[in-house]
Image: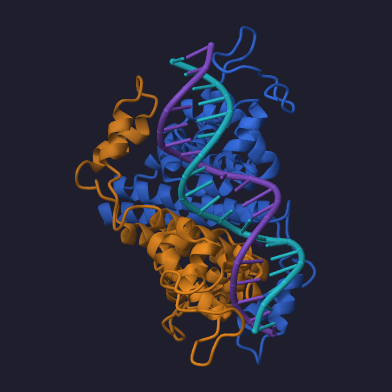
Chain colours: A blue, B orange, C cyan, D purple
Amino acid sequence: MGNGKGEARRRGAGRPRAGQEPLTRERILDAALRIVDGEGMGALSMRRLAADLGVNPMSIYHHLPGKDAVVSGLVGVVFSGMRMLPSEGLPWQERVRAYAHAHRGIVRSHPNLALQIVSNAAAVSEAVLSGAEPLYGALEETGLPPKTIVRAADSLVDFVQGFSLGEASNPSGGFDIGSELLARIETQPADNVPALRRVFEALGEEGARYDFDAGFEVGLDILVRGIEVIAAEGARRERPG
Amino acid sequence: MGNGKGEARRRGAGRPRAGQEPLTRERILDAALRIVDGEGMGALSMRRLAADLGVNPMSIYHHLPGKDAVVSGLVGVVFSGMRMLPSEGLPWQERVRAYAHAHRGIVRSHPNLALQIVSNAAAVSEAVLSGAEPLYGALEETGLPPKTIVRAADSLVDFVQGFSLGEASNPSGGFDIGSELLARIETQPADNVPALRRVFEALGEEGARYDFDAGFEVGLDILVRGIEVIAAEGARRERPG
DNA sequence: ACCTGAACACCGTTCAAGT
DNA sequence: ACCTGAACACCGTTCAAGT
């Protein structure tokens, strides 16, 4: 016993031999992302990760301090890949929308990581640094005071994250909002949910499938219009004649 | 061996004896919520839960099919406690705000459960049934078509959930947005984050602490105003003269 | 420096058995 | 019906040892 255990190619202890790629933080995170993307967060364990890398579980600890570090490293990797279409010359409304789409795109391309992306405060802070510059650039042009710019930016990010989380945790594409929900509404005692009933019955078959793309656009529209309104009010207050 | 193990009062196997409260789904969820509220999600295990109840770990499985069921049961319990101040006669804007505050209040009162609340799709669906009636009632008065009402409601809920998640994962009260973030912005190479720098430098000491209450109001304001705008546009489109 | 083996203190859950 | 004990197949991480 000792050698040739399973598919691991590595034989002895000690340094990697010439020709073998050494273990690095990057290689570890790559392998971890493959596991999470392919099989979900539940499949990620230090032991499984080590097995995929052909390495002893403890070797990982020389490059990352623990499992938490692996997970937040993953979030960092994913967010650092955020790219926006250049939208320099466009009006701020378009630039805000471009940011929102890029942010949603990141979460959507790694649905199994969505929960960590959205909840990892450190990663969000990282995202502000690396990705939110265009958002702040756009919002500066509204003329709102700095404090309100920050709050508007946060509101937009909160919406995008809330939306993306819902999107990530639902079966691919649109999901049927009509059938199950309407059935449950209709079995409600007496009618203690009259408005819900009216709205969803009016939707009927036509609106049975929820369209995430259209829903995102409506939400974005509401936010951008809302920002326009408070910006206009602020300006009117400054020179009220 | 056999009897008197630790603090568990229960002695023999079989049915609970007279005078002992029997194990129920409700008692299990109560105990689980106490653990999560007090020590966080990481402290919740079937074995720990059983110990707190003075019961064999396996006994729980007779009332709930597994750990996942315990967690989503928890989310259900918490959401079923959502209560709104009655706001029947008020304008729809006020009623939308009341709903948002109630929803935020639920998440805020169980910060350690925030992640599950926000991500548990089944619970969200449950929340729609039990709690969103007032929101739909309010939004009906905007005159928007049913499909847009659903999307506006979802956008509001997405914002509230995104906001609440950020709030729950940050140290109590406001957190300092200025010090750490500004320090990192200022160490950025060259100046590839000019807008961020301008905004956060203008905030300075005054805005160093993030005020969650004020931030929530601004976000709500943006959303309500935005809904007003798209509702007005829809009405204008219907009778364009 | 970098990697390993064995061990520790846990998990959730199945299954057969008790009353 | 309701509860239990032992066992199975896992975890993350510490620690001392190897090269």
Farthest residue, direction left: B205
In percent of width and height, residue A156 lies at 47, 50
Residue at x-position 49% and y-position 54%: A223
> Left or right: A7 with respect to B107?
right
Residue A153 locus on image (x, y percent): 42, 47
In this view, A139 is above or below B220: above
**Residue B44 vertical placement versus A196 (above, below):** above
Q: Which residue occupies the extreme right position in the image?
A: A205
Q: Residue at x 54, y 66 (%)?
A: B232
Whether residue A161 is visible: yes
Q: What residue is shown at x 53% (from left), y 41% (from top)? A: A94
Residue A186: image x %, image y %? Answer: 72, 83
Of D10 and B210, the residue lying toward us:
D10
B147 or A234, nearer to the observer? B147
* Residue located farthest toward the front when viewing the structure as drawn: B1
Residue B104 visible, this orientation: no
* Relative horizontal placement of residue A190, taking residue B2 as reference (left or right): right
Quadrant of residue A98 within the rendered picture: top right
> Which residue is at the front of the view, A184 or A228?
A184
- Image quadrant holding the C terminus of chain B, namely bottom right
Tell me which residue sits at (53%, 60%) in the image.
Answer: B116
Query: How many marks are shown on the rendered structure?
Result: 0
Q: Residue furthest top?
A: A18
Image position, residue A178 (x, y; %): 74, 70
